[in-house]
Amino acid sequence: MNLTSHKTKFISGEVICPGDKSISQRIVILGSLLNCDMKVKGFLNAHDPNSTLNALNKIGAAIEKQEDKVFLQKRKNSFKSSLEDLDLGNSGTGMRLMMGLISGLQIKAKLIGDSSLSNRPMLRVIKPLEEMGALIKSNKGKAPIEILESSISNDFVYKMPIASAQVKSSLMLASLASHNSITIYEPKITRNHTERMIEYFGGKLEYSNNKNGYIKLNKSNLKPKKNYNVVGDFSSASFIIVATLIAKQSEVLIKNVGLNPTRNGLIKVLSMMDANIEIKNQKLICNEESGDILVKSSNLKGIEVPEEIIPNIIDEIPILSIAAAFAEGLTSIKNASELRVKESDRLNAISDGLDKLKIKHDMFNDGILIEGNDNLVDFDGYINSFDDHRIAMSFLIAGIRSKKGISVKNCQNIETSFPGFKATMTKLGMKINEKN
Ligand code: S3P
């Protein structure tokens, strides 16, 4: 499916942010481990969380879904090996977290994914899981991944070579499911939804009090709860935020956005760029900060993005690049080589799109330098989304500041994270239509 977004004078209104993808996946995994009756509200009903939910049901979980409500049910039987393949679709989080869970449960399963997921690096999870005692076969470190009956050791200590919340969470789930403790050192602080959720259900964690510190998960008996509410996805909100900033005379209120400090680094970065963003109604929902974000059009200025914040804006760099393209001066993003192994090689995908829009930039191995300006972009052909949801949405947002609109090829993967994207942006005043 190809989409075209059109030049938009201004956008305005109020929208409710869709559920957080990372948290939706974690609550069905952790909820299944808790083995209780629990109602989850605000679940992101999109391809990625749904493929994780389906995979869990194939290993014996009892989860039902009605739109954005999920009902976890107490099971009579324990988890079981799956004879059928578990298809995690496009979801790196789904595959890596399920690898940890399945290893910890000491059951067998084969995990597969789409062509993008089958090309993503899995050794970052396979290696430490094997050191913990997991038995794993893979296609040279990539999917398909076959997990055989594993026996996970206690008191494992792991120093992560890369800053990755997926690796951290996978290892914690392996320990949790096998009733063991684990200590993980992370080189930079990454998103901490797994830790927060474990603590919400009464698990015991210890942290070092310096930056490059450790997280220790002690043997814990988690306590079930009847309800869980998923806060809104900051990553989805970021498309609406940048759309408002680059449109003229615009003002938008985004309600119920997750504001976990390990996720919302983009607010800090955009504020450094002189963005007009206000947070209202802050509260804690199921151990996650949330609030409403009021955004107004702004004249953005280019900046050097601080390197330590990169893991906390990693999924927002495509849309940050669009903000940078319409900001005055240079924006530099460094130390972001992880972008090369996301749903697409995102540095390459951003550069390819900016090239077509004639936005001056230099791409490096681990980052990009973008020279922005206030002009409207003038372009006829198609931007390649590289089948990547965040690339597709980013360039569609850039259409706001185009002379003749922007067409993006293969936008179907928007369904993996933000199925209501087109409807939401249309409600705010953008015009986006299908193009053959
Ligand atoms: C995620 C962690 C991030 C992020 C991904 C979701 C998670 O990946 O890019 O979209 O839910 O843990 P890494 O932890 O591999 O950087």
Image: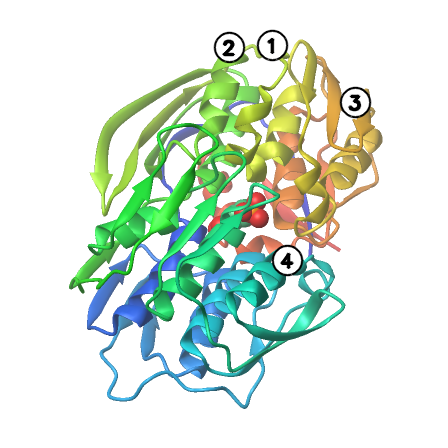
Does the rendering let one see residue 429? no
Label 1 or label 4, whichever lies nearer to me, is: 1
Residue 317 position within the rendered picture, expressed as x and y whole percent measured from the top left: 61, 33
Circles 1 and 3, Cβ within 8 Å, touching? The answer is no
Q: How many other residues sit within 10 Å of disc 2, few (<14), some (14-19) or many (≥20)?
A: some
The amino acid type found where label 4 is placed reads Gln
Q: Give the residue pinned by disc 4.
A: 412
Q: Which mark is residue 274?
A: 2
The residue carrying mark 1 is: 301
Give coordinates of residue 203: x percent, y percent.
Answer: 24, 55
Q: Earlier in the sequence, mark 4 or mark 2?
A: 2
> CB at mark 2 closer than 8 A to ligand 1?
no
Q: Quadrant of residue 345?
A: top right
Q: Are marks 2 and 1 in contact (CB under 8 Å)?
A: yes
Tell me if 287 is positioned left or right of 386 in this view: left
Q: Mark 1 vs ligand 1: CB under 8 Å?
A: no
- Whole-angstrom CA distance, mark 1 to mark 4, is 33 Å
Per the image, label 2 sits on a secondary structure element best described as: loop
